[in-house]
Image: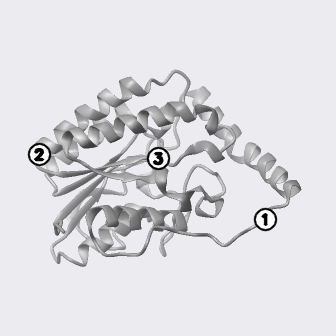
Amino acid sequence: MRHYGSYVALGDSFTEGLNDPGPDGRFRGWADRVAERLAEDSPSFRYANLAVRGKLLDQIVEEQVPLAVQMAPDLVSLCAGGNDLLRPGSDPDVMAKTLARAVRELRACGADVLLFTGVDPRDTPLMRRLRGRFAIFYLHIRSIADLYGCKLVDQWSMQGLRDWRAWSEDRLHMNEDGHRLVAARVLDVLGVPFDDWRKVWPERTADPRVRRREDAQWVREYLVPWVGRRLRGTSSGDGLDPKRPDLAPWTPDAP
């Protein structure tokens, strides 16, 4: 087990921490949870989270990766590409080349790099049509991790994340339980003692009529606005700054 003295998190809404509100109302998320645990083993531990919701892979590579290289941390997590894969015409082969270039830059600065596959989308009615595209990109991520000696967090195999109780109402972002499971898996990959990520949910039966009403409500409240932003070329992260832009000593309530 390596004791990390510094950690920089890169990515989009998943790494920013939507929808896992902390005690102060700001989003917490799996990365903050990981930082909190790592800080227990290193009194001088420093942490930055540069992730911003809605960011595409190219934006993360161009805007966040150079900053992480300058910070020269012990550990970097990079999870990107999910927003791209949902857009028409995205090419997982081209995306993989972009990701590989970023990983080479991060590894060259001496950092350990954490990469992520995503959750299997087969249980999501709309996203499962794109399952092949997601699978190809995640296989590329596995290859990149092998080629460059990265640590891999495989969410595809996390059965606990296939239950809707791990997700918020928008069905795109995890809730507190989901983020806690991911943090546990990340720490397990790092060899750091923490909670077990192998969640088994109690059996639950859902009334099909209730499910249909929930589906219709989800379309109105979340899907239609999301499609509208895509058509307008806007993002939920436009104008937002990273929540922890500087590699600074860990404090749970930092802005």
Mark 2 and mark 1: span between their CA atoms?
50 Å
Tag 2 and tag 1, C-beta contact below 8 Å:
no
| Front position in the image: 124 or 35 | 124
Which one is closest to the eye, mark 2 or mark 1? 1
Q: Is residue 204 above or below residue 140?
A: below
| Front position in the image: 15 or 93 | 93
Residue that numbered label 1 is attached to:
205
Q: Point out residue 30 in the picture as x, y percentages from the top left corner.
A: 41, 63
Residue that numbered label 2 is attached to:
109
Mark 1 and mark 3: span between their CA atoms?
26 Å
Q: Point out residue 158 in the picture as x, y percentages from the top left corner.
A: 49, 57
Any mark on residue 118, and which?
3
Along the polypeptide, which appears first: circle 2 or circle 1?
Answer: 2
| Front position in the image: 187 or 35 | 187
Helix, strand or loop status at disc 1: loop
Q: Residues within 10 Å of mark 3 (few under 14, many from 20)?
A: many
Which one is closest to the eye, mark 1 or mark 3? 1
Q: Point out residue 240 in the picture as x, y percentages from the top left corner.
A: 43, 47
Instruction: State which quarter of the image contains the N terminus.
Output: bottom left
Q: Residues within 10 Å of mark 1 (few under 14, many from 20)?
A: few
Could you tell me the amino acid type at mark 1?
A: Thr
Q: Is residue 116 above or below residue 179?
A: above
The residue that appears at 57% across and 69% down in the rendered structure is 200
Q: Residues within 10 Å of mark 2 (few under 14, many from 20)?
A: some
The residue that appears at 53% across and 43% down in the rendered structure is 236
Q: Point out residue 160 in the picture as x, y percentages from the top left corner.
A: 55, 62
Which one is closest to the eye, mark 3 or mark 2? 3
Is residue 5 visible in the rendered image? The answer is yes
The residue that appears at 64% across and 33% down in the rendered structure is 227
